[in-house]
Amino acid sequence: MNRLIAALAAAALALTACGQQGAETAGAPAGEAPAIPDPAKGSVNLYTARHYDADLQLYDAFTRATGIKVNRLEMAPDQLIERMKAEGASSPADVVIMADAGALWRAEEAGLLAQASIPELEQAIPANLRDPEGEWFGFSRRARVIAYHKAKVKPEEVATYEALASPRFKGQVCVRSADNVYNLSLMAALVERWGPEKAQAWAKGVVANMARPPAGGDIDQIRAVEAGACQVALTNSYYFLRIARSEAEADKRVAEAVTLSFPDLAGQGTHVNISGAGIARNAPNRAQAEQFLRFLTTPEAQKIFAGANNEFPVAAGVETPPQVAAFADFRADPMPVAVYGRRQAEAQAIFDRAGWR
């Protein structure tokens, strides 16, 4: 009875949270019949740090495929973690979703995730994109790349991450803050490949090259390149692809002036991160949670990640929209993404010493 009460409370909390944050109510894409939950199939409670409208399509497609109702609570990663810690064994969360391997590691370190052995996930998801102990799994990929002004920068000038710290880009680099988890994960990867000394020197070089103090998100950095505030910027790939697919005139100007370099890291390829999920340690609906995770590797779900949010699939052989496919043929660093969490504290210390705020 306590679990039933908790699950019902989660549904109410999810609706409240969505209303507070302006999130949309899940609904089928235009032209499709709405998903109709089957009460006999139960529900699944998602605690998610992903804030993309595209995910509503995922939830609706899951309900259509399974009859299982989706309740969601959307908050920032650290807020979700603190909430689950406070809820303890009574937490109604079934699935925890994060937009970065480093954030998943934080949830794992807090003891909030359960180990799961799900053969379908182990077959579909490369080993370097999931936790070795089965506490979380990557379901979409995003590369942290360099956006550059096509008329001002030659492609060969941004072929490596080292370029951002070179004298060539003195006063020409736009970045977001150091405590952003995407930057922390990139720095963790640099430490893993280069060692702490070279990574520290790189951070200092980037700080010396900054066109302005770190501010805003990745899209702000891309727009700054087009506006002439800087010539190069760090960004996740899907932010630029979102702009490139936009019909807004301002976005068309950005896409015309700016493009992406997928820089090399120590001869291993481009730094890649994930969005992923794991089953909550005290999940009241474990069976439904496993069904949800399995669904995320299906061709339907993988196409939604690519088509609706411009991310790269983790599963092989998934058809992607032309705009995404045009950038998908890059060499990805095979580094296990679990490294990003383990080196997160070291990464933050390097940024702090470099004066990257």
Image (cartoon, rainbow, N blue to C red):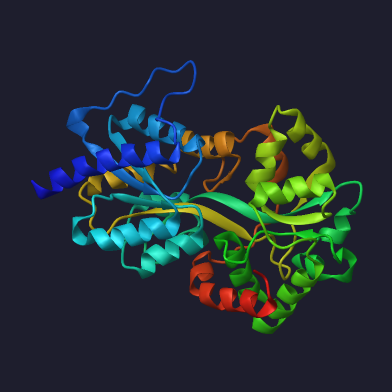
Q: Residue at x 49, y 60 (%)?
A: 101
Left or right: 290, with 101 as reference point: left
Residue 116 visible somewhere in the drawing: no
Q: Point out residue 133 in the picture as x, y percentages from the top left corner.
A: 37, 66
Measured along the vertical axis of the image, is residue 53 above or below residue 30? below
Q: Point out residue 166 in the picture as x, y percentages from the top left corner.
A: 84, 70
Left or right: 108, with 217 as reference point: left
Which residue occupies the foreground of this view, 189 or 112? 112
Q: Point out residue 146 in the picture as x, y percentages from the top left corner.
A: 75, 55
Left or right: 151, with 286 as reference point: right
Q: Residue at x 44, y 43 (%)?
A: 297
Q: Quadrant of the C terminus?
A: bottom right
Which residue occupies the foreground of this view, 348 or 315? 348
Measured along the vertical axis of the image, is residue 105 above or below residue 317? below
Q: Point out residue 250 in the picture as x, y percentages from the top left corner.
A: 76, 33
Q: Residue at x 87, y 60 (%)?
A: 157
Measured along the vertical axis of the image, is residue 94 above or below residue 199? above
Q: Residue at x 79, y 72 (%)?
A: 208
Residue 311 visible somewhere in the drawing: yes
Measured along the vertical axis of the image, is residue 95 above or below residue 102? above
Residue found at the far left of this picture: 1
> Residue 201, located in which quarter of the rendered image?
bottom right
Residue found at the far bottom of this picture: 197
